[in-house]
C-alpha cells in the first residue's frame, strides 16, 4: 500500500498545472523566455556570447523572482506594494489617538445664543423610576459618570476592596478558603 504525506496546513498547497509548475510560474517563465531569448539571439554577434548571456540573465531574473519568490504566503508584487506603502505612501509618524469617555464634554451655549427655548425631554424608564423612588438611585445610572482619578482611597480601604474581590473570585471558582489563605 502506498503512503502519501498530507500537509497539516492545506492553504499552502498549490494546484500544479503542468511539469509540476503552477499557472503563475508557467506564465512568468514564458514571459522571461519571450524577453530573454530574443535579446540573446539578436545581440550575441554584436556584443559577444558571454555578454549576451549576462544581458539575457539580467532581463530574465525579475520574471523568475515574480514566479518563485513568496514571503508569508504573499507573492513578490504584494510584498513590494506593502513595502512601498509603508516607506512612501503613509506618514512615518503614526499617532495613537483615543477617545476619553470619562472626560466631561464642554457645554455648548448654542441654545442660549440663538434665543431658542429648550424643550423638556420625555422621561425614560430609568428616570421615571428614579423620580418615583424619591430621587434615590435604585440601580446604575449610566448617564452619571464618576471621575475615578479625583477620588482617593486609603490603603485600608483598598485592602478591604481587594479582599472582597478575592473572596468573590474564590466563590466563583467554587472554593471558600482559597482567598483567605496567605
Image: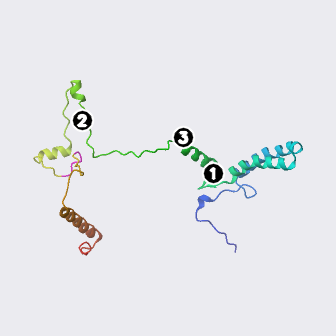
Q: Residue at x 18, y 64 (%)?
A: 156
Q: Residue at x 30, y 70 (%)?
A: 173
Q: Distance between the residues labelled 2 and 3?
A: 39 Å
Sequence-first disc among 1 and 3: 1
> Where's residue 6, x and y in %?
63, 67
> Where's residue 8, x and y in %?
58, 65
Secondary structure at badge 2 equals loop
Pointer 2 with pointer 1, Cβ within 8 A: no
Please count the marks in the image: 3
Secondary structure at badge 3 equals helix
Residue that badge 3 annotates: 89
Of tags 1 and 3, which is closer to the observer? 3
Q: Distance between the residues labelled 2 and 1?
A: 54 Å
| Label 2 packing within 10 angstroms: few (<14), some (14-19), many (20+) | few
Quarter occupied by the N terminus: bottom right
Q: Which mark is residue 107?
A: 2
Secondary structure at badge 1 equals strand
Residue in front for this viewpoint, 15 or 71: 71
Q: In this view, does 170 lie to the left or right of 51?
A: left
Q: Is residue 145 left or right of residue 11?
A: left
Residue in front for this viewpoint, 127 or 94: 94
Quarter occupied by the C terminus: bottom left
Predominant secondary structure, magenta span: loop
Q: Residue 142 in magenta?
A: yes
Residue in front for this viewpoint, 88 or 127: 88
Q: In this view, does 46 lie to the left or right of 168?
A: right
Sequence-first disc among 2 and 3: 3
Q: Residue 75 carries which label?
A: 1
Of tags 2 and 1, which is closer to the observer? 2
**Which segment is the magenta one?**
139-143
Q: Is residue 7 left or right of residue 104?
A: right
Of tags 2 and 3, which is closer to the observer? 3
Amino acid at each position: 500500500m502506498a503512503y502519501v504525506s498530507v500537509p497539516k496546513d492545506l492553504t499552502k498547497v498549490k494546484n500544479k498545472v503542468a511539469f509540476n509548475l503552477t499557472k503563475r510560474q508557467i506564465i512568468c517563465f514564458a514571459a522571461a523566455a519571450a524577453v530573454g531569448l530574443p535579446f540573446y539571439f539578436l545581440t550575441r554577434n554584436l556584443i559577444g556570447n558571454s555578454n549576451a548571456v549576462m544581458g539575457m540573465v539580467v532581463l530574465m531574473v525579475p520574471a523568475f523572482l515574480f514566479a518563485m519568490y513568496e514571503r508569508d504566503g504573499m507573492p513578490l508584487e504584494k510584498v513590494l506594494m506593502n513595502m512601498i506603502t509603508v516607506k512612501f505612501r503613509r506618514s512615518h509618524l503614526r499617532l495613537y489617538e483615543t477617545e476619553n469617555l470619562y472626560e466631561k464634554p464642554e457645554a455648548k451655549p448654542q441654545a442660549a445664543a440663538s434665543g431658542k427655548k429648550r424643550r423638556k425631554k420625555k422621561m425614560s424608564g430609568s428616570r421615571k423610576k428614579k423620580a418615583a423612588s424619591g430621587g434615590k438611585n435604585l440601580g446604575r445610572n449610566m448617564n452619571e459618570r464618576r471621575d475615578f482619578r479625583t477620588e482617593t482611597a486609603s490603603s485600608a480601604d483598598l485592602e478591604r476592596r481587594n479582599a472582597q474581590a478575592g473572596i468573590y473570585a474564590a466563590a466563583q471558582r467554587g472554593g471558600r478558603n482559597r482567598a483567605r489563605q496567605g
